[in-house]
Image (cartoon, rainbow, N blue to C red):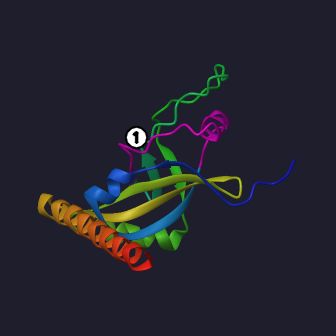
Amino acid sequence: MAKETGRKLIAQNKKARHDYHILDTYECGLVLTGTEVKSLRQGRASLADGFAQLDGGEAWLHNVHIPEYSQGTWTNHAARRRRKLLLHRAEIDKLIGKTQETGHTLVPLALYFKDGRAKVEVALAKGKKDYDKRQTLREKQDRREADRAISAARRRQRA
């Protein structure tokens, strides 16, 4: 069987980028059971309520929903169990210091396969206020309008 290469996206947390200022991102491995991997290969997962927590010098991923594998038997996994994140010791130590600051948290941004291995992209983030969210939306709309105006001007120029 040929070895997988590249990155295959399974799930993405778009709401996290809207609700948080992303300060830094980390790519982590996951400790999974066999039925979890099979369920992920079917492209089924949700990061909507997920968060990461540092506990006892280890990183854990909570509330990420990986549904039970349909062909699984009594060996099936719990859908929302906590899963261990695989990070280097230096990264964990750095995150412990950063998350103890007020308002900082760890949120999962994406769940994907990279070269056949399940990975999760975790971000060190700080919560946005409502006015920050409105400002971000306003900037996004302004960029879109500017791009539309530029492309319309180019079309008129060619004609």
Residue 77, horizontal then vertical, whole percent: 57, 30
| Quarter-of-image position of residue 127 | bottom left
Q: Residue furthest front?
A: 159
Res 54 seen here: no
Q: Which residue is mark 1?
A: 63
Residue 108, position as x, y percentages in the image: 42, 54
Residue 13, placed above or below residue 149: above
SS of the residue under disc 1: loop
Q: Position of residue 159 (x, y in %)?
A: 43, 75
Between residue 5 and residue 148, name the one nearer to us. Answer: 148
Left or right: 131 as drawn, with respect to 154: left
Task: Please state the extent of the stretch shown in magenta in the rendering.
Answer: 31-52
Q: Is residue 3 left or right of 67 when viewed as pictured?
A: right
Residue under the image location 55 percent in, 37 percent down: 44
Could you say where residue 112 lies in the image, as x and y percent from the top left? Answer: 57, 52
- The total number of labels drawn is 1
The reply to whether the magenta stretch includes residue 48 is yes
Residue type at mark 1: give it: Asn
